[in-house]
Image: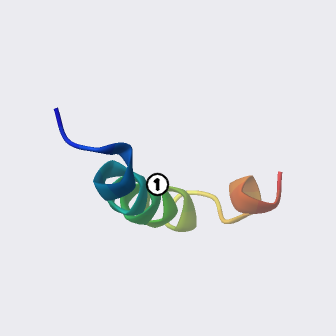
Amino acid sequence: MTPMRKTNPLMKLINHSFIDLPTPSNISA
């Protein structure tokens, strides 16, 4: 299993791209 430290940045990048595209308001929520 990959360490959370490696998954944290990866997931954050993917989540940001997913949220930034559909609804940027989700980030503030």
Residue at the image position 32 percent from the left and 50 percent from the top: 7
Q: Amino acid at mark 1?
A: Asn
Residue at the image position 46 percent from the left and 59 percent from the top: 12
**Furthest residue toward right:** 29
**Furthest residue toward left:** 1
Which quadrant would residue 2 be assigned to in this image?
Answer: top left
Q: Is residue 12 left or right of residue 25?
A: left
Question: Residue 11, position in %: x, y?
Answer: 38, 52
Residue at the image position 63 percent from the left and 58 percent from the top: 23
Question: Residue 25, position in %: x, y?
Answer: 76, 61
Q: Is residue 9 left or right of residue 19?
A: left
Q: Is residue 17 left or right of residue 19?
A: left
Q: How is the image coloured?
A: rainbow
Residue under pointer 1: 15
8 or 14: which is nearer to us?
A: 8
6 or 21: which is nearer to us?
A: 6
How many numbered discs, if any? 1
Question: Residue 8, position in %: x, y?
Answer: 42, 53
Q: Residues within 10 Å of mark 1 (few under 14, many from 20)?
A: few
**Furthest residue toward top:** 1
Secondary structure of residue under mark 1: helix
Which quadrant would residue 27 be assigned to in this image?
Answer: bottom right
Location of the N terminus (image quadrant): top left
